[in-house]
Every structure is written in structure tokens, then in C-alpha cells.
Amino acid sequence: MPSEAADGLMFSPWDPTDVDGLVQWVVDQSWDNYVTRHPTPAMVRGRVAEGFYAGPDCETWWIQHEGADPPVGLVRLHDLQDTGALFDVYVCPQWRGRGVGLAALRWLTRHLFHEYPHVMRIEAQTRADNRAMRVVLRRAGYVKEAHYRASWPTETGELSASVGYAMLRQDFESGRTTPVDWDAEP
């Protein structure tokens, strides 16, 4: 599969034979808004072996910026056989706040709806305190659908609130947002 360009970035599929490169890239970063901030090489290798990064229901893409080495981020798409796909976007700390997350979200939305015609919605969940990702989700047209109290485990064992967003295929194709009926209580 060739590289795809979007918003000044290149998206290239991760080669599953390059486990060492993926492991090194993941452990070299700090993932502040994820359950595990500092994954170990053994953890990443275990995830690779479990099909976390590639398989019939998952694909992983590098986010590259011209002149930058190593990649500036990673997109993991999963639940690809369901009508509701999910994703993870990882942006290196030094590239955060520079539009990479928004470009990645716009790219993955187009990619999923174009390449997977059975996908009717793309779902996202993030910690409630991850304000940057929440802003990016809204800017990309995703709609807040849920607020989960004490649902996201942290490394300390505490539970953080999380927020769910989604993009519907019909909204993506029409350019209009289907509102959430918050008052539809029985």
C-alpha cells in the first residue's frame, strides 16, 4: 500500500516485519494521556504478537513529516470489521500543538469511510482532561456523545473520567451534523 499525503504530512503503512523499529519508536516517547505512559519493549512486543498493530481487524500507519526522522506520529485503526471503527492517534511530544493530530484525524476519517464502505461510524474515546484531543475532535467534526465518570484507568490506579465522540458516515458525506437528542429520557 503506497504512502498517502494529507495536510502536509505523509501516512505510510507500518510494515509488520519492522517490529524493532516500532518498539523503539513507542518506548522512546512519553504517552501522557494513555493508560501506560512509558511502555516497555516487552509490552510493545507483546502487543505486536497479540495483533494489536496489524491483523484482519487492525492496521497501523506512520505519520511522517518531510525532513523529520523518525516519524512524528502513529495512527492505529481497529475494529475494522465492525460498523463502528475505532482509532488511536499517537503524536510525539515535540510535535504536539503543531496540527499533526488534526491532520491525522482528518486523514483517518477520510481513509476509513473511503476504504471501508461498511463502516457507518468512527468512534473515539479520550480522557476528559485531554483537552487538546477534545478540541481536535470537535474541529474535525466529531460530536460528543458520552461522558463516562471514573472510567479510564491511570498508571496510579486511579480512575479518570473519559469522553466519547463519533463521526457518522452520513455526517461526513453531507457535511452536516446529526444532533444528539440529550433530552430523550423515558
Image (cartoon, rainbow, N blue to C red):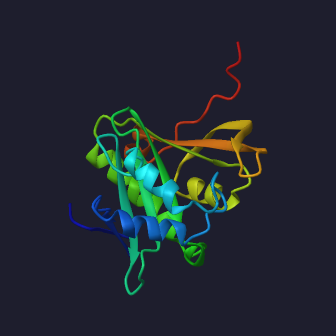
Residue 30: percent from left, percent from top:
62, 68
Please, is residue 109 above or below residue 57 in the view?
below
The reply, left or right, for residue 96 in relation to residue 174 is right
Q: Residue at x 45, y 50 (%)?
A: 46
| Residue closest to the far top | 186
Does residue 157 appear in this view?
yes
Q: Residue at x 30, y 58 (%)?
A: 16
The reply, left or right, for residue 1 in relation to residue 44 is left
Does residue 73 appear in this view?
no
Image quarter where the C terminus lies is top right
The reply, left or right, for residue 147 in relation to residue 79 is right
Please, is residue 172 above or below residue 61 in the view?
above
Residue 116: percent from left, percent from top:
29, 42
Compare residues 77 and 172 and report the one nearer the observer: 77
| Residue closest to the far left | 1
Q: Residue at x 63, y 55 (%)?
A: 36
Splitting the image into 4 quarters, where does residue 56 fall?
top left
Image quarter where the N terminus lies is bottom left
Compare residues 169 and 11 and report the one nearer the observer: 11
Residue 91: percent from left, percent from top:
53, 67
| Residue closest to the far bottom | 67
Residue 66: percent from left, percent from top:
37, 83
